[in-house]
Amino acid sequence: MMPEDRPKSDRSVIERTRAETREPELFSVIFLNDDYTPMQFVVDVLESVFDKSPAEAFRIMMLVHTQGQGLCGVFPWDIAETKVATTHALAERLGFPLKAIIEKA
């Protein structure tokens, strides 16, 4: 059957599709204080892993030191997980017990 031989109908299905984009769910990366990790190491990790300026890294390190924890940044899950894993690997390699956790933002 050729297209011109098909029965004609005034009924047709119109399908509308709408592309819907959603922002990814965000998670906070938080450093926890301990009594053994040097402050300079925390600053170095904040600068290298979290791309913080020296002043911002120092401010976050002081929050960790004085308040027991400090917010390092807010990221989608996969990025937050990678930054925490990198932090733990660097700390473990140098023998420091620095811990970072992920919480829903």
Image (spheres, rainbow, N blue to C red):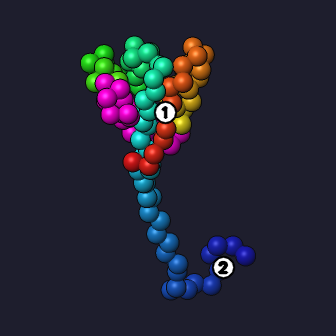
Taking the spot 48% from the left edge, 19% from the top edge, the residue there is 36
Is 15 in front, or is 64? Answer: 64
Q: Nearer the viewer, mark 2 or mark 1?
A: 1
Taking the spot 49% from the left edge, 38% from the top edge, the residue there is 101
Question: In the rendered structure, which segment of residues is drawn in magenta?
Answer: 62-80
Queried whether the magenta region covers residue 26, the answer comes back as no
Taking the spot 62% from the left edge, 84% from the top edge, the residue there is 7
Callout 1: helix, strand or loop? strand
Q: Crowding at label 1, few (<14), some or many (≥20) Cα neighbours within 10 Å? A: many
Residue 83 image position (x, y, % from top left): 50, 30
Tell me the quarter of the image containing the N terminus.
Answer: bottom right
Which residue in the protein does label 2 denote? 5
**Amino acid residing under circle 1:** Ala
Indicate the quadrant where residue 21 lies: bottom left
Residue 97 image position (x, y, % from top left): 54, 24
Callout 2: helix, strand or loop? helix
Q: Is residue 32 above or below residue 59?
A: below
Queried whether the magenta region covers residue 75, the answer comes back as yes
Residue reaching furthest to the front? 35
Taking the spot 46% from the left edge, 27% from the top edge, the residue there is 34
Indicate the quadrant where residue 5 lies: bottom right
Residue 31 image position (x, y, % from top left): 43, 32
Q: Is residue 42 left or right of residue 94?
A: left
Is 25 in front, or is 35? Answer: 35
- Evaluate whether residue 48 shows in this view: no
